Amino acid sequence: MKGNDKIRREYLSRFANRSYFMQGDESVAYGSLYAGCDFFAGYPITPASEVAEVMSAELPRVDGYYIQMEDELASLSAVIGAVWAGAKGMTATSGPGFSLMQENIGYAVMTETPCVIVNVQRSGPSTGQATKPAQGDIMQARWGTHGDHEIIALAPNSVQECFELAIEAFNLSEEYRTPVIILMDGEVGHMREKIIMPPLDKVKIRERKLATGDELLFGGELIPPMAEFGVGRFIHVTGSTHKESGIRDVESQQAHHTLVTRLCKKIADNRDRIIRFEENHLEDADFVVISYGATARPAAGAVLRARGEGKKIGMLRLITIWPFPESKVRELGARVKKIFVPEMNLGQLSREIERFVKCEVIPIPKIGGIAHTIDEIYSALKGEV
Amino acid sequence: MIEIDEELCKGCGICVDFCPLKVFETSDKINSRGYYPPLPVKEKDCVGCRLCELLCPEFSIIIINE
Amino acid sequence: MAEDADRKEVAEKRRHRLFKYLRKEVLPTAFCPGCGCGIVLNCYAHAVDELQLDPNDIVAVTGIGCSSWIPSPYFLGDTLHTTHGRPIPFATGVKVMQPDKTVVVIAGDGDLIGIGGNHLIHAARRNIDIKVFLVNNLIYGMTGGQLAPTTPLGISTTTSPHGNVEHPFEIAELVAAAGASYVARWTTYHVFPLMESMQKALTKKGFCFLEIRSQCPISYGRRVGQRTGSEALQEYKESSVRIEDAAEMSPEELEGKIIIGKLIEREKEEFTGNLRKLNVELRTKKTGRSPEEWSLS
């Protein structure tokens, strides 16, 4: 139990069972505090700055630490350093900052550092429509850092879910010793909704598995235990290929193969435990809409309208984007006629879906910083079902 | 007194060149890694200033001052 | 003969004392013969031995480059070998969470000034209690001798084959101006003051920065007629000017000189201390909205 746990519990108990009207950005910050986050380093960027604003106000009150760094490279660096020194750490950013973080995301993967990265997606490429929402970082979240790796990314679609997935993100990152990305979009980040905060003791926290003796910290089992600095383990943490002891070994083909395949396997072998999605009206569906994040809201409206007209259409809302729920999508693809994919990009997830199905996949793309309306999605479905 | 671990030496010659009293010469015997370590030929001239000990990049030289 | 064995034993004990701070299993070092990194490593081991620091209380953080190998893997202690240019922000995270540890960053000019220059000045501005030992060899050595932001004007490197047209950084002066608590510059020839300066930095609160001019015989020295470590040290010996003397000299007289000594030493509020103070203050005094106040129900 951490030294600051009592202070944290006492402060957060005042939120229990109360309802608030707040933004997704604020909610994801409170969820993180509930999860035990006690370190935040970030750099302001629209539409993610509100996460930093809440953290800068609240972290000192729970005896945690907020630092505004000089850029996003430094932000994730400080988070990783803090985690090895015992913190539960996170950062929050948007597209351009997320691009800058890619190298250190790879470092966190390679060094098996649990941490949470919130990416409130905005319209790109480059500065794009700086303040406006998008869902254009689906593939950057998956493949942004170089080299073979697996990643976990979660996409909330409501303010309440931002809170819940923040807790889940920390839990997954600790359980699998890996960075977890909360792939929000500017829409859900800036949307204001009612949220109810649970009592802290109703929230399930999965804590970091710490070495109790001289266990190997970088191998030996699929997910080795971690150790924190200062306990006399003389930990050697490196982003270079390393042996199970942590000591660098960049020459051996076998060492690299063993390490990188294990890092991938620990996520891939646990897909079923990690992946979450929401199914609606899929039992009798001949058609299905697959969506996620804010777009899933108008998508659900369009599906309901079509069903009202007697169409056999259902919906799959992805909560986990990565690892991709391929077995679920494959199963659906084998029994439906068409899959529709509304998303706020020019068709990123729809391409991933195409890899697993033989039926027709119809993207319903929209970019330009304005979310889909129910009408738009409904009209795209209408002619096809 | 000068104690040299010849096996740690990489034969850079810094000790030979910078000893203020020119105590060292380069040995003509190579160590197992193929380097020529220093030989403290004028050890009796050594005043124990420890410059060589600190300048050695390999921890090869230890000066013992009684 | 018996006396010989005794001497060996005493020497081994002394060496063992220094090796207490090193990962013996990875020695001898991978540094080229005559490399300044070995001298910095040696001075560091002597400095921590003099201070009798416990390796448990030291966290070493480093980046990418030959001099990053000084702490990683050679230092014993918790070691964080980070991405290129980022050791200072990584160290910032470590220090904030474990303020009682001595957090040391040792890295090169390419890492700390080139790709990571922004972090260096911001850490100095915050005055976070991190010890930064910059091993400045004026070149990208590990990658074979490319132009660095410290390479002097006119020098030809593999990426300035017609001669460098850029002015180099005066890095110690920059860090002093940015707000560090302690800044000094030495060379690998000046091992005694360097070792003392390291001890000063390790014990003084605040952002402490040492610029250590160091030789790279292989990737830099041979381009400027210094093919061995000794030739570089000879230059350091001859062209170094104490900062007190430099104050009396004209810019023309200082051309090509290395100004050595302490640039700055001052008392200033330290960053992690301020963070902690804030947390304590917030617990005793009510500020901002309370959770009850802005709840809907």
Image (cartoon, coloured by chain):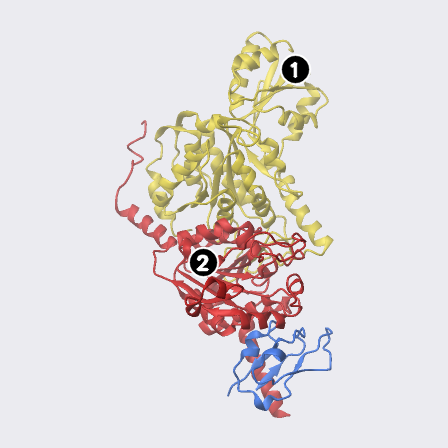
In the rendered structure, the colour chosen for chain B is: blue
Residue A147, position as x, y percentages in the image: 66, 43
Chain letter of disc 2? C
Residue under the image location 44 percent in, 27 percent down: A190
Q: Nearer the viewer, mark 1 or mark 2?
A: 2
In the rendered structure, the colour chosen for chain C is: red
Q: Mark 2 sits on what residue? A: C173
Report crowding for label 2: few under 14, some 14 to 19, many 20 or more residues within 10 A (C-alpha).
Answer: some
Residue C233, position as x, y percentages in the image: 58, 71
The number of discs equals: 2
Q: Is residue C279 above or below residue C217?
A: above
Task: In the rendered structure, find residue A286 and report the number of the disc placed on it.
Answer: 1
The answer to whether any part of residue C91 appears in the image is yes
Q: Which of A90/C127 is in front?
A: C127
The answer to whether any part of residue C20 appears in the image is no
Quarter residue C22 falls in: bottom right
